[in-house]
Image (cartoon, grey):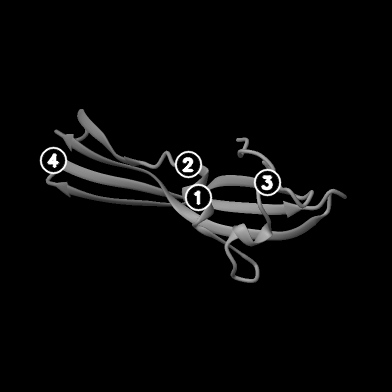
Amino acid sequence: MTPLKNGMTIYRHMTPAAKTETGTNFAGLVGSSTVSQSNRLSYFLVGADGIVKDWSTGSVQGSASDCVQYIGGVINRCNDTQQLQASLALYDVRVATRAGQPISSWGEPAAPAVN
């Protein structure tokens, strides 16, 4: 949550969204698979009265992994190819208010952001 100088507060929420899986199999001897996930961002601007005044949504890439299976899956090797651990500033640029504006249009933070 981030309190703003105008008395309102921004609340941030991130949840898993779409998950994509692809794979191949070569005669049961060698196979591969890739799993990637995206995360849905939902921000809410809440007034001092506790009522939601506006909202903002967007999405970011989450985790991804590549796996190779040998001999019908008996041997399995996986690598995490991407794990997005980003600052709030990176997430904030990925969302737009319902009017299509950046969330900076909601106001200036009263203090450094609190997770």
**In the rendered image, the vertical position of residue 35 relative to residue 45, given as above or below:** above
Amino acid carrying mark 1 in the image: Tyr
Density class for disc 1 (Cα within 10 Å; few <14, some 14-19, many ≥20) is some
Element class at badge 4 = strand
Q: Nearer the viewer, residue 34 or 101?
A: 101
Q: Which residue is mark 1?
A: 91
Element class at badge 2 = loop
x 46%, y 49%: residue: 90
Q: Which residue is mark 3?
A: 11
Density class for disc 4 (Cα within 10 Å; few <14, some 14-19, many ≥20) is some
Of the numbered discs 3 and 4, the one sitting upstream in the chain is 3
Task: Look at the numbered discs 4 and 2 and tell me whether their residues touch, using CB distance below 8 Å.
Answer: no
Of the numbered discs 3 and 2, the one sitting upstream in the chain is 3
Label at residue 87: 2
> x, y (%) of residue 75?
19, 28
Density class for disc 3 (Cα within 10 Å; few <14, some 14-19, many ≥20) is some
Q: Gap between marks 4 and 1, in whole Å?
A: 38 Å
Q: Gap between marks 3 and 4, in whole Å?
A: 46 Å
Amino acid carrying mark 4 in the image: Val
Amino acid carrying mark 2 in the image: Ser
Q: Nearer the viewer, mark 3 or mark 2?
A: 2
> x, y (%) of residue 36?
36, 48
Element class at badge 1 = helix
x 50%, y 48%: residue: 89
Report the side of 75 relative to 109 (left or right). Answer: left
Q: Nearer the viewer, mark 4 or mark 2?
A: 2
Task: Look at the numbered discs 1 and 2 and tell me whether their residues touch, using CB distance below 8 Å.
Answer: yes
Of the numbered discs 3 and 1, the one sitting upstream in the chain is 3
Quadrant in which the N terminus is drawn: top right
> x, y (%) of residue 14?
56, 45
Q: Gap between marks 3 and 1, in whole Å?
A: 13 Å
Q: Which residue is mark 4?
A: 30
